[in-house]
Image: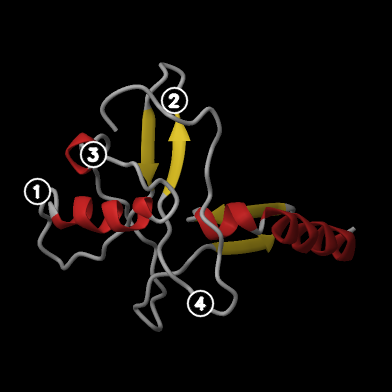
């Protein structure tokens, strides 16, 4: 967001029970600016590094729900990239994350936001596994 952040704390829009939808958080940075995100889109096998300009419209609509004074032309792209996904050989579907335990080793693969928000559950799962092995 161009300009000085009107917020001095992170804003996580409220989740709606039973509804899974993309959210757009607001995060002030150390330079007094403001960043919105995250966003993710699926892509096909053709790697395209062009930025989807429609994301700004989608962000604007979501941001306006909690920041009604947002100015649309102050929204600019910051960090854009490709995030690889691990997929199952059986289903070919991308996995959220994968936990493999064995031979005194724990491997945590592909952990993104769902893993971060359930990190206590992951820790508990691993602790229980370690207890069984010991």
Q: CA distance from mark 2 to mark 3?
A: 15 Å
The answer to which of marks 2 and 4 sits earlier in the sequence is: 4
Front-most of residues 106 and 63: 63
Tag count: 4
Q: In screen coordinates, is 104 left or right of 3?
A: right
Q: For residue 81, what is the image quadrant?
A: top left
Q: Which mark is residue 19?
A: 4
Q: Secondary structure at mark 2?
A: loop
Q: For residue 58, what is the image quadrant?
A: bottom left
The C terminus sits in image quarter: bottom right
Residue to which mark 1 is pinned: 50
Q: Which mark is residue 75?
A: 3
Front-most of residues 84 and 59: 59
Q: Secondary structure at mark 1?
A: loop
The answer to which of marks 2 and 3 sits earlier in the sequence is: 2
Front-most of residues 9 and 130: 9
The answer to which of marks 1 and 4 sits earlier in the sequence is: 4
Assess disc 1: are there few (<14), some (14-19) or many (≥20) residues with their C-alpha within 10 Å of its C-alpha: few
Assess disc 4: are there few (<14), some (14-19) or many (≥20) residues with their C-alpha within 10 Å of its C-alpha: few
Q: CA distance from mark 3 to mark 4?
A: 27 Å
Residue shown at the point (25%, 40%) measured from the top left = 71
């Amino acid at each position: 967001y161009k300009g000085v952040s009107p917020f001095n704390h992170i804003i996580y829009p409220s989740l709606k029970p039973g509804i899974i939808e993309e959210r757009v958080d607001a995060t002030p940075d150390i330079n007094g600016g403001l960043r919105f995100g995250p966003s993710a889109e699926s892509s096909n096998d053709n790697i395209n590094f062009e930025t989807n300009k429609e994301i700004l419209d989608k962000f604007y609509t979501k941001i306006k729900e909690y920041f009604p004074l947002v100015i649309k032309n102050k929204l600019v792209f910051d960090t854009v990239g490709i995030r690889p996904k691990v997929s199952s050989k059986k289903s070919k579907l991308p996995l959220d994350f994968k936990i493999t335990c064995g031979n005194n080793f724990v491997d945590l693969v592909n952990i993104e936001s769902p893993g971060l928000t359930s990190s206590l559950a992951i820790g508990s799962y691993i602790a229980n596994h370690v207890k069984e092995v010991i």
